């Protein structure tokens, strides 16, 4: 109980002091002015046809991106978590890799693929299709980036559906498609809705992908907020738009709460029951193989572009390691950045963040689970704040808030570390909440009747049963921290770099000579991520078992 209270208070305090306080301080700075006419002019300017069109476009692309992510992620979750076949864990890890890639690198990979001379454009040109200036590039990139959310959240629950439903549907003569649409999907709907909400919010607040892949006339709400905030010429409009964005996302979350309130996750069994690939029918084997080939191709091709670009060098016709050699050579130039320091910084941030975030999320979910409905709703909303508050606006508010002489945390590692924790909290908390909700009430009551102290439920009951879901939270928290770019670029000191920031520095330099350096460092990041996630899968978080 002491752990539950301590980590719950820690998480709530971080949200209050490093999200709510900066937003309130920024609001006071903008609106507490002597020129009220300027404020009302800004308020009226937001409600015009231009901003209305931007909101509609933002919702449209986020909705389409979510649908495509579901279209790819749900079949993948079923195959990867319901069927045993050689290489399943490797493919599952491969599907997770896109989520941790730096946004800038993913965007450049897709821009290369869909350019006039790109691999995909060459194939599509045969049928007369042209995607180089299409919104579908952004939608497909979003689906690529977020499909792992669907797979990693829905998959573990799909794997644990009680065998009783399978047996009952077989006795009633249900066919495979009937079982899928009338049994499995209705049972999984709360989890699917939760995963869809996260994907929609990520696509709705997407910045880097749209900045690089979008055309000159394609603006979204996050992009407009960044431009107004970055230039400091439209600060009032930026804050008003940010508040509207927060309200919109809060409405989505309220709808989600109403839907989840009357849903039950008691269908989950504590024993994984998977089919063997050899036991499938011929048509099922063919369909599974086709989709596995597609998901592997879809996951690998953008990464393959990184490798091809990383191993090519100007004026050298064959593959070479020249780009890798160059990034580790200190030429004495003032602009030189040591990639080893960036790698250490990124791994330190990601490891520390994922561990602490999972502790806060799990123990808070354990504590709130037994509390009153009103308190639970308040904590739910607080822990959703890192998703619905734009990172750019949040970072700017933090800079303004913590610039006092007695509390000057600007450009400090601790501030970056705290922001990374906040960005990972929604994943950890909501995955833990869903996992604990899936534990049957009969199990909880039986454990109490058998003498288990209520304060030890988290250790004796919850932790052993939900450890696989905690693994998903650790992976996503690690991924968010490893690939985070926006907050680090605004809050860092001049001598602090992470891998995504170094990659962006290479890509932002005028000479194409440094472009290969960025791809080389991206390949190093992919390799680190793949090894890390694979080891986490193999270890199956033994540290939590102990």
Image: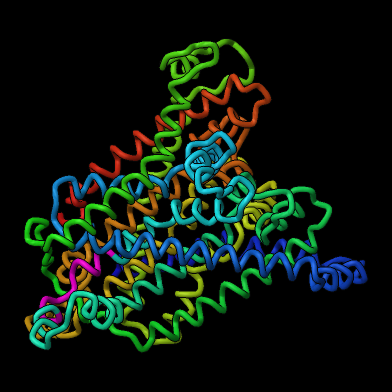
Q: Residue drawn 13% across and 66% down?
A: 272
Residue 390 sits above or below residue 119 on the image: below
Q: Residue furthest front?
A: 127
> Percent from the top left, x then y, of residue 470?
28, 60
Quadrant for the C terminus, please: bottom left
Residue 529 position by quadrant: top left
Name the residue nearer the viewer: 531 or 516.
516
Looking at the image, residue 49 sits to the left or right of residue 521; the answer is: right
Q: Quadrant of residue 177?
A: bottom left
Residue at point 47%, 20% (across, down): 312
- The x and y percentages for residue 266 are 22, 81
Magenta residues? 155-165
Q: Nearer the viewer, residue 401 or 391?
A: 391
Left or right relative to 130: residue 274: left
Q: Quadrant of residue 83?
A: bottom left
x 56%, y 48%: residue: 128
Q: Nearer the viewer, residue 498 or 294?
A: 294
Residue shown at 40% from the left, 57% from the top: 147
Q: Is residue 74 above or below residue 167?
A: above
* In the depicted structure, whether residue 519 falls above or below residue 404: above
Q: Is residue 149 magenta?
A: no
Rendering coords of residue 133 (x, y %)? 64, 48
Instruction: Left or right? Give the position of 90 relative to 107.
Output: left
Magenta region's main secondary structure? helix
Image height check: is 265 above or below 18?
below
């Amino acid at each position: 109980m002491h752990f539950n209270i301590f980590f719950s208070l820690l998480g709530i305090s971080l949200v209050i002091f490093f999200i709510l306080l900066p937003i309130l301080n920024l609001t006071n700075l903008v609106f507490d002015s002597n020129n009220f006419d300027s404020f009302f002019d800004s308020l009226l300017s937001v409600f015009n046809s231009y901003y209305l069109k931007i909101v509609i476009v933002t919702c449209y692309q986020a909705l389409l991106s979510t649908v495509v992510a579901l279209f790819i992620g749900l079949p993948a979750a079923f195959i990867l978590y319901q069927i045993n076949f050689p290489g399943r864990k490797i493919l599952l890890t491969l599907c997770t890799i896109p989520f941790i890639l730096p946004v800038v690198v993913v965007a450049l990979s897709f821009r290369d693929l869909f350019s006039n001379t790109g691999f995909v454009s060459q194939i599509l040109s045969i049928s007369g299709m042209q995607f180089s200036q299409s919104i579908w590039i952004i939608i497909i990139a979003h689906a690529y980036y977020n499909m792992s959310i669907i797979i990693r959240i829905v998959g573990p629950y799909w794997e644990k559906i009680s065998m009783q439903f399978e047996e009952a549907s077989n006795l009633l003569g249900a066919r495979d498609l009937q079982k899928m649409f009338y049994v499995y999907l209705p049972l999984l709907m709360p989890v699917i809705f939760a995963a869809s909400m996260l994907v929609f919010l990520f696509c709705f607040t997407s910045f880097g992908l749209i900045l690089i892949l979008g055309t000159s006339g394609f603006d979204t709400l996050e992009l407009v907020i960044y431009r107004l905030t970055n230039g400091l010429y439209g600060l009032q409009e930026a804050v008003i738009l940010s508040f509207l964005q927060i309200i919109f996302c809060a409405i989505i979350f309220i709808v989600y709460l109403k839907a989840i309130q009357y849903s039950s996750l008691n269908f989950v069994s504590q024993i994984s029951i998977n089919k063997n690939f050899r036991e499938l029918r011929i048509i099922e084997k063919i369909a599974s193989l086709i989709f596995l080939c597609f998901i592997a191709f879809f996951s690998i091709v953008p990464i393959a572009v990184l490798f091809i670009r990383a191993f090519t060098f100007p004026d050298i016709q064959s593959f070479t390691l020249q780009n890798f050699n160059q990034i580790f050579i200190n030429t004495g130039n003032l602009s030189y950045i040591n990639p080893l320091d960036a790698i250490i910084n990124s791994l330190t941030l990601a490891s520390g963040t994922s561990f602490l975030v999972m502790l806060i999320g799990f123990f808070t979910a354990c504590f709130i689970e037994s509390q009153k409905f009103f308190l639970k709703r308040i904590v739910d909303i607080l822990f959703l704040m890192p998703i619905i508050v734009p990172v750019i606006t949040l970072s700017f508010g933090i800079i303004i808030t913590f610039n006092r002489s007695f509390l000057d945390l600007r450009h400090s590692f601790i501030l970056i570390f705290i922001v990374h924790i906040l960005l990972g909290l929604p994943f950890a908390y909501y995955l833990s909440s869903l996992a604990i909700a899936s534990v049957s009430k009969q199990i909880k009551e039986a454990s109490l009747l058998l003498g288990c102290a209520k304060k030890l439920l988290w250790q004796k009951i919850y932790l052993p049963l939900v450890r696989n879901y905690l693994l998903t939270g650790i992976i996503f928290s690690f991924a968010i921290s490893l690939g985070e770019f926006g907050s680090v670029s605004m809050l860092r000191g001049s001598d602090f770099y992470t891998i995504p920031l170094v990659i962006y520095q290479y890509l932002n330099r005028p000479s194409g000579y440094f472009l290969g350096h960025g791809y080389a460092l991206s390949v190093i990041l992919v390799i680190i991520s793949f090894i890390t996630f694979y080891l986490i899968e193999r270890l199956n978080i033994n540290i939590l078992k102990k």
